[in-house]
Amino acid sequence: MKQEEKNDAMEVKRINIRMPIHINDWVNEQAQAHGVSVTAFINMRLAEIKRQDDMAKAMTVMTNEKVIKMLEGQIED
């Protein structure tokens, strides 16, 4: 991977998050329990949510009647 591509892959955006104190306390506890920073913990959880969302979208496509009929038509050809 070229250095320029590495830099693009590592580009980040800084944000501020406001949350209720009890949620903040839970996030801090969970980050500590996982041995990571709060930022790393939040990123891990968001990545997990994104993977689940991507999987749900893929399953929606795979179980769509039109897609199934199209695939069955391709298989029969």
Image (cartoon, rainbow, N blue to C red):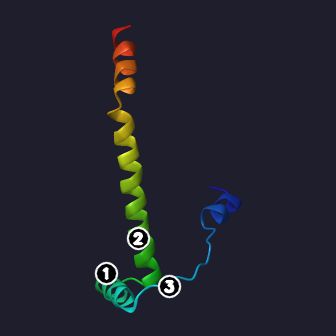
Task: Say above or below: 57 vs 27.
Answer: above
Front in this rendered view, residue 7 or 17: 17
Residues packed near mark 3 inside 10 Å, few (<14), some (14 to 19) or many (20 plus): few
Question: Badges 1 and 2: C-beta atoms under 8 Å apart?
Answer: yes
Mark 1 or mark 3, which is nearer the start of the sequence? 3
Q: Nearer the viewer, mark 3 or mark 1?
A: 3
Mark 2 or mark 1, which is nearer the start of the sequence? 1
Residue at image coords 60%, 67%: 10
- Residue flagged by tag 3: what amino acid is it? Arg
Find numbered disc 2 in the image and state the secondary structure of the residue it sits on.
Answer: helix
- Mark identifier at residue 43: none
Front in this rendered view, residue 44 or 26: 26
Percent across and percent down for residue 2 are: 67, 57
Find numbered disc 1 in the image and state the secondary structure of the residue it sits on.
Answer: helix
Residue where numbered disc 2 is placed: 44
Q: CA distance from mark 3 to mark 1?
A: 22 Å
Residue where numbered disc 3 is placed: 18
Q: Nearer the viewer, mark 3 or mark 2?
A: 3
Residue where numbered disc 1 is placed: 34
* Residue 53 falls in image quadrant: bottom left
**30 left or right of 1 in image:** left
Residues packed near mark 2 inside 10 Å, few (<14), some (14 to 19) or many (20 plus): some
Residue at image coords 39%, 62%: 49
- Residue flagged by tag 2: what amino acid is it? Met
Quadrant of image for the N terminus: bottom right
